Image: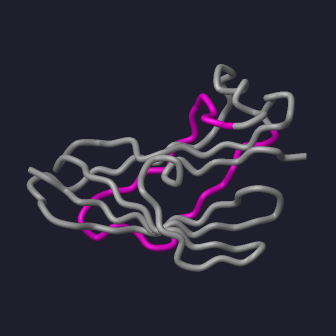
Amino acid sequence: MITAVALAVVVIGASGLAEASDSFKRETLSRTVMSGVRTKLGQHWHINNDCSLADVPVARIVEAPKHGRLEIVRQPVFPTSSGKLERCRTVKVMGLVAYYTAKAGYVGEDRFVLRAPYGDGKIADTTMTVTVLK
């Protein structure tokens, strides 16, 4: 049974819930990055109640950024769970990490949409607006 799931971009930034149902939600987040610099935007994992890996999550790029590159990398992460699973923060598990790199010299806004599961059988679309500074 999967008991904790997180999409890092959901954890890292101010969010506004645009639409939700019991099994699907849309979220909007924003981040500021430097032009041409690879920046970690978040991470995603699935863990069990005992902090062990439930499975390696999946994430799909629904809409790619127009002014940079989005990478979804499979690598070990420390879950940033809260509540009763907060104790799992010191247990490294395999997960996904999202990295964004704006094109060198680009300054302005970019955006992309990621789709990933959360909880048991639920799906979230996260729209990330990225402000790129010089």
Judged left or right of residue 64, residue 66 is: left
Q: Residue at x 24, y 49 (%)?
A: 33
Q: Residue furthest top?
A: 90
Q: Is residue 130 left or right of residue 125?
A: left
Spot the residue most to the right: 1
Magenta stretch, residue numbers:
54-82
Query: Residue 78's x, y, as percent?
Result: 60, 28
Q: In the image, residue 91 lies at what x, y percent?
A: 69, 22
Residue 2 in picture, x, y percent from top left: 84, 46
Residue 56, magenta (yes or no) = yes
90 and 40: which is toward the camera: 90
Q: Is residue 71 left or right of residue 76?
A: left
123 inside magenta stretch? no
Compared to residue 27, the image places residue 96 above or below, namely above
Q: Residue placed at 63% from the left, 61% from the top?
A: 116
Q: Is residue 124 above or below residue 52?
A: below
Q: Residue at x 28, y 50 (%)?
A: 101
Out of 84 and 34, give the one closest to the viewer: 84
